[in-house]
Amino acid sequence: MALNADTIAALAERLEACQLEVRDTHKITDDFPEMDFQDAYAVQAELLRRKLARGRKLAGLKAGLTSFAKMKQMGVTSPVFGFMTDDYLVPHGGEVTTAELIHPKVEPEIAFVLKKALTGPGCHIGAVLEATEFVLPGIEVIDSRYRDFKFDLKSVIADNTSAARFVVGGQPLRPSGIDLRTVGIVMEKNGEPVAFGAGAAVVGHPATAIAMLANQLGARGESIPAGTLILSGGITEAVSVAAGDHVALHVQGMGSTSLRFV
């Protein structure tokens, strides 16, 4: 690690303040170019510690920048991982208050819910599918705390991979009942299709993203517990939204979920 504990705590406080006060900042590697990936995940861990200390609960985990489209859009080459707390959860068909967000975007995802724990290293697609209770449609609302949504990989990891809100719904489906590589999705904004894709856009197979997360956690001596909900990453490029927009996601064989921005 290149940064000391006081600096990591200060960076977490800065990023959290931006989220709570709905304001942006320049990317933190502008100030700390020596920051490494271990530092970035340490800042993210401190963000989670601060949230849990205020009474929030962990609601799930997420992979980010896992689709080739998202990597190209954001100018990065590797997936990232983060967490979701209970204040991020939007009920199926529920509302998101845009005044609480800086510059929100939405992306279509396939969510996994585990029946068994996953532990790396050595986790692979087969292990993920065998450990999965069901999959279902999910929409993630991302909202980078960085100005103009511009960041590098270390900065976005520290910012908890731009996590802000999420919704899941539709018809839960056992993974044995569908080929997650070829499953098709359509995302609509205000009744008009704005994004199309298939599961293979997420690093070849959505379960690969879950395996990568398990392996990363395994390297730190951690695992993904049974019962965990995990968003496997955006299938398409993110779509900007504003107050008044209604977003719906339709996933082949899994039904639909939606949310509204007010």
Image: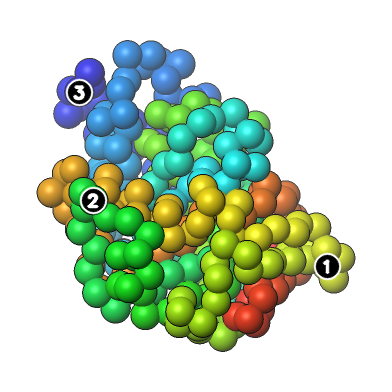
State how far apart marks 2 and 3 are (Cα): 25 Å
The residue shown at (83%, 63%) is 193
Mark 2 sits on what residue?
122
Q: In the rendered structure, which disc, 1 or 3, sits on the residue that comes first in sequence?
A: 3
Mark 3 sits on what residue?
1
Which residue of the protein is positioned furthest toward the left in this rendering?
221
State how far apart marks 1 and 3 are (Cα): 46 Å
Q: What residue type is labelled 3?
A: Met
Residue 190 is labelled as 1
Confirm whether residue 83 shows in the render: no
Q: In this view, does 122 lie to the left or right of 61?
A: left
Quarter placement of the C terminus: bottom right
Report which quarter residue 154 is drawn in.
top left
Q: In this view, does 254 lie to the left or right of 242?
A: left
Q: Is residue 91 above or below residue 97?
A: below
Which residue of the protein is positioned furthest toward the right in this rendering?
192
Q: Position of residue 80 (x, y in %)?
A: 42, 42
Q: In the rendered structure, which disc, 1 or 2, sits on the residue that comes first in sequence?
A: 2
Q: Position of residue 15 (x, y in %)?
A: 41, 37
Q: Position of residue 237 (x, y in %)?
A: 68, 47
Give the mark toward the camera: 1 or 2: 2
The residue shown at (32%, 56%) is 124
State how far apart marks 1 and 2 are (Cα): 43 Å
Q: Position of residue 116 (x, y in %)?
A: 24, 74
Image marks 1 and 2: residues in contact by CB distance under 8 Å: no
Q: In terms of depth relative to the viewer, which is nearer, 16 or 48?
A: 48
The residue shown at (38%, 60%) is 125
